[in-house]
Image (cartoon, grey):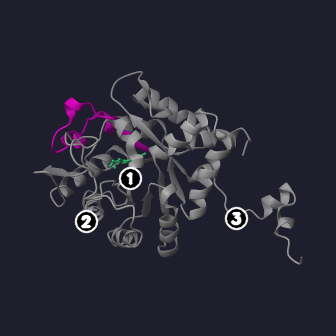
Amino acid sequence: MLTRPRRNRATAPIRAMVKETHLSVDNLIYPLFLVDGKNQEIEIPSMPGISRRSEDAALREIEACMNLGLRNFVLFPAVEDALKDREATYSYVEDNFYLRIIRNIKESFPESSLMSDVAMDPYSSDGHDGLVENGQILNDETLPILQRMAVAQAQAGIDIIGPSDMMDGRVEAIRDELDDCGFENVAIMSYSAKYASAFYGPFRDALESAPKMGDKKTYQMDPSNKREALREAALDMDEGADYLMVKPALCYLDVIHMLNEQFDIPITAYNVSGEYAMLKAACANGWLDYNKAMPEMLLSIRRAGASGILTYFAKDYATLVKEGKI
Ligand code: PBG
């Protein structure tokens, strides 16, 4: 036998030397769910270890993360039903709790980076990402609402705007409006290839944002489609996106890989709530070893080509690194 690949795996230093993919805490973006009020930290049953937090609790969580070297966060509001309406007006009320918490996080932790979510669903009485009329999700009529939301978030101090709504033309609409309002340095991470996935269930529990009627298949992508992701990505790139995101991550590693080959801006991936819940459930049953399976999952997303990974595992991963366990 002339060739024995095992020789390159013989010792730990050799394995470390030939390692092709490195995953750092710097690659991770940690999602936080925010609620109004004080001293609230309510665990989401379908996402063990993840809570909805009021401002004080969120600031404590961010401090703990910053101490672990985890500095990128994406923030989602859980809005009470009474504040939701058809046009998602609460999303751009200047002193709404989401924008207030963003301001205060930026003030307390100026060295953190904050990403927002732009879509109507957390604020919409219809639970859809766009405006609903006669059972249809209106595209062009939704854009001005997204523009107002994005500008309000930029004013509050958001570094990266995250349009997750999948309306056509939204990246350009948001880019234009941000520039017109003097926010040309605020970036856009577009949810470019966002699939109509069954893996968002626990997130919708967290925000109580599930659609009241129908599904999201007229705007989110069909899980069967890969070439269509190229089209979405090319549009977002042309419209001024700074990052292209694939969502979910684990069932769509082929799409992450393809976009990374085809585009020269950073590719990011959203390791979504259902992917988190799945692993947590298996580990709670003793069927998988969390400290081994979780880093392997994240590494696979990185290996596929994502530079940034939005993941509920971020804090646990940073803790393992800090403890020298990986
Ligand atoms: C809202 C939004 C969703 C997620 C992120 N932003 C849900 C949806 O599109 O229904 C899902 C994230 C997750 O499952 O972790 N537009």
Amino acid at dot 1: Ser
Mark 2–mark 1 distance (CA, rounded to whole Å): 22 Å
* Secondary structure of residue under mark 2: loop
Mark 3–mark 1 distance (CA, rounded to whole Å): 30 Å
Q: Which residue is mark 2?
A: 169
State yes or no: discs 3 and 2 in contact (Cβ < 8 Å).
Answer: no
Closer to us: 34 or 301: 301
Residue 266 seen: no
Height in image: 53 above or below 65?
above
Q: Which residue is mark 1?
A: 197
Which span is picked out in magenta?
74-100
Q: Earlier in the sequence, mark 3 or mark 2?
A: 3
Mark 3 Cβ inside 8 Å of ligand 1: no
* Secondary structure of residue under mark 3: loop
Query: Residue 170, position in %: x, y?
Result: 27, 61
Instruction: Give the number of callouts.
Output: 3
Q: Residues within 10 Å of mark 2 (few under 14, many from 20)?
A: some
| Numbered disc in front, either 3 or 1 | 1
Q: Which mark is residue 20?
A: 3
Reply yes or no: does residue 109 show up in magenta. no
| Numbered disc in front, either 3 or 2 | 3
Q: Residue furthest top?
A: 39
* Secondary structure of residue under mark 1: loop
Height in image: 254 above or below 148?
below
Height in image: 164 above or below 122?
below
Which residue is drawn at the image coordinates 40% and 36% (left, top)?
Answer: 33
Amino acid at dot 3: Glu
Q: Earlier in the sequence, mark 2 or mark 1?
A: 2
Reply yes or no: does residue 92 show up in magenta. yes
Mark 1 Cβ inside 8 Å of ligand 1: yes
